[in-house]
Image (tube, rainbow, N blue to C red):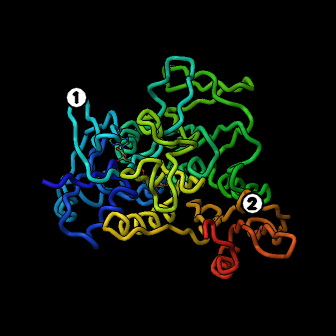
Amino acid sequence: MTSPVVIIGTGLAGYNLAREFRKLDAQTPLLLITADDGRSYSKPMLSTGFAKQKDADGLCMAEPGAMAEQLNAEIRTHTRISGIDPGHKRLWIGEEAVEYRDLVLAWGAQTVQVPIEGDGGDRVFPINDLEDYARFRAAAVGKQRVLILGAGLIGCEFANDMSLGGFEVDVVAPCEQVMPTLLHPAAATAVQAGLEGLGVRFHLGPVLTRLQQVPLGLEAHLSDGSVIACDLVVSAIGLRPRTDLAAAAGLQTNRGVCVDRQLRTSHANIFALGDCAEVDGINLLYVMPLMSCARALAQTLAGKPTTVAYGPMPITVKTPACPLVVSPPPQVHEGTWQVEGQGSDLKVLCIDAEGKLLGYALTGAAVMEKLALNRQLPAVMA
Ligand SMILES: Cc1cc2nc3c(=O)[nH]c(=O)nc-3n(C[C@H](O)[C@H](O)[C@H](O)COP(=O)(O)OP(=O)(O)OC[C@H]3O[C@@H](n4cnc5c(N)ncnc54)[C@H](O)[C@@H]3O)c2cc1C
């Protein structure tokens, strides 16, 4: 019997690749293996669940059984792979060996955890998949005060959503502005003001040092000496692509699992896409790039080697308190910033020496200009 194409992970990368592959090849055995429950969902919806009044079950789009039928695939849930043996084209699930024709790593990124002193550690919730989200929703029943660690894109989205869900929200982050790696300070100020308008309180600069249980909830002690009363803590301090198993198998890794434009790792029959993949030196943790990769890789797996290209990739940030679309300039290019507009309606452009647009951030009413600007943006990976 032919060994299957094996995909590790049933997030957006794994399931979209399987869908694209099945459009081209209905017969080759396909096996998906996932450490989680295998339910199909759209991860970006995790940060709009309260506003849309959807719990984890409400966000689930299909059960794994339905996905297996739709994809004509076997799906093994709650199954964690523990090793890869590229030389023998097999992987390990504990003691069990599974052979593959081609192996695709779509195992995502894991949340960064920091040690926190005190006895409140079990009240800290990372939210990076549907099961995390279900745990948080269950713990949040009857609670009112949420402390969010991290003021990046995901921390700000959760702050907006949980405020709309009726929570009192504090955000703590050791940076001078929100979304420091994505946004020009002027746009960051507009977004922060929008969130503050909802009642979100920002504590930018200090870190959480100790979390202590008290009779009425938790006390969060910050490095600047201040203390915040809260009931739950959401950790949104960052994601790190999963690379350990790949590195242990001798595959080349850097920030992510290194792959070329055909999504091929340093081993011929092993590919990677999604949050875990560093494609030609670029690791993007967004949906648009993984969709482009899924289409290209499906072609390659179906026998037509295909390279991936990324066009402009603007990000719509889900902070309706201050609408935001951002396309950060590629780091290799030097540009100067221009800020137009005022208040919450800002057009912040990054322009190169020849007057070409390299990137932008649009806030408030200025987001209307995104389509016109997108046409001028350079491709992220031509
Ligand atoms: C709250 C939030 C909001 C977001 N909003 C946006 C947005 O608005 N726009 C946007 O473009 N992007 C957004 N993103 C990012 C986007 O959702 C991700 O880039 C994308 O979902 C990643 O998909 P993935 O399949 O690569 O990884 P994941 O969805 O993390 O899937 C990884 C899979 O691998 C499995 N796995 C891991 N290790 C193993 C193992 N050893 N064995 C077996 N299985 C394993 C997991 O169980 C899981 O099934 C958001 C992310 C978050 C957290």
Q: Would residue 117 be found to the left or right of residue 350 on screen?
A: left
Q: Image height check: is 277 above or below 113?
A: below
Q: Quadrant of residue 330?
A: bottom right
**At label 1, which amino acid type do we have?**
Glu
SS class of the residue under badge 1? loop
Residue located at (64% from left, 64% from top): 324
Nearer to the camera, 201 or 211: 211
C-alpha distance separating marks 1 and 2: 52 Å
> Is residue 50 at least partly visible in the picture?
no
Residue located at (75% from left, 26% from top): 224
The quadrant in which the C terminus is found is bottom right
In the rendered structure, find residue 187 and report the number of the disc placed on it.
2
Indicate if the residue with disc 2 has its beta carbon within 8 Å of ligand 1. no
Mark 1 burial class by Cα count in 10 Å: few <14, some 14-19, many 20+: few
* Circle 1 residue: 95
Q: Would residue 314 be found to the left or right of residue 12 on screen?
A: right
**At label 2, which amino acid type do we have?**
Ala
Residue located at (63% from left, 30% from top): 228
Q: Name, please, the residue furthest toward the top.
A: 118
